[in-house]
Structures are given as C-alpha cells and as structure tokens.
Image (cartoon, helix red, strand yellow):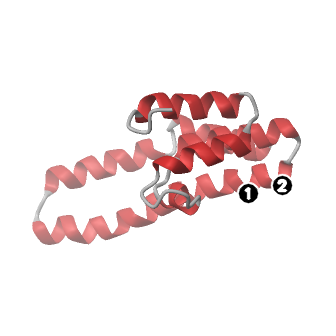
Amino acid sequence: MDLADRYINNESVKRMLQSDQVALAGKTVVLFTKDGGQHNNLHDMQCMWYELASDESYFRHGDFGRALEKFIAVEKHYADITEDQFDFHSYCLRKIKPRAYVGKLKFKDWLHSHAYFHKVAAGAIR
C-alpha cells in the first residue's frame, strides 16, 4: 500500500469491512491517523464512514453488542454537533453575523435528515 494515497487506502479499508475483515481494516485505517495507531483518533475525528462500515460488519458477524456500541457512538457525534451549535448562537449575536446565523439554523434543520444518521438509527433499531 502507498501510505501517501489516502483515497485508495480508504477504499481498500471499505472493501475490507465489506468482506468482514474488521481486524485487518482496523489495523490499516489507523495508519492514516495523526498519531498512527490510536483507534480513539477515529472517534475523535468523527470518522463516521469507518464507524458505520465496521458497525455493519459486526452486525453481519452476529456481534450485536459491539455493533450497538458503535452505532451509539456515531449517534453521539450527532449529539455533539447539535450541542456545539449552542455556542454559535451567542457568537453570531455578539459579532452580528446574520448570514452565518441563518445558515446555521438551516443546517440544524438538515442535520438529522443526513444519510449517516438514518443508517445509524436503522442499525440501532435492528
């Protein structure tokens, strides 16, 4: 693998997860994190595509506890995004940025209609 080509490496990790090679995919994907080798960085970076793909793989393997744990972790990303927006209210009012404020309000309406959120909700319900 060429460690400089992140697109190809991400695609190979996706294919590993689709073929239920979770351990190999986990070892491969951490090569591209900042600290290299820390799985928590993926969670801190809110890397939802990896978490969703690994969730599905765990679910196909029948490891429902681990899959649910990961689905809940992705849902927590959405809760964090929503919570972070509360700080933006006072910022926009203080700096008088109405265009950014209106854009944020529109984003808030769109946030829970994102495809990743729907996949997380459907996976957690399964």
Marks 1 & 2, CB-CB < 8 Å contact: yes
**Residue 87: image location, x then y, percent:** 32, 70
Q: On the image, which quarter does residue 38 sit in? A: bottom right
Marker disc for residue 65: 2
Amino acid beneath label 2: Gly
Number of residue marks: 2
Residue 58, placed above or below residue 100? above
The residue carrying mark 1 is 69
Find residue 82 and report its horizontal and vertical position in percent.
45, 59
Compared with 89, 34 (above or below) is above
**Distance from Cα at disc 1 to Cα at disc 2:** 6 Å
Circle 2 sits in a helix, a strand or a loop, which is it? helix
Q: Residue furthest front?
A: 1
Residue closest to the eye, 37 or 20: 37
- The location of residue 77, given as percent across then percent down, is 53, 57
Q: Is residue 106 left or right of residue 21?
A: left
Instruction: Please tell me how crowded label 2 is: few (under 14), some (14-19), or many (20+) other residues with Cα within 10 Å.
Output: few
Amino acid type indicated by mark 1: Glu
Q: Residue at x 74, y 36 (%)?
A: 21
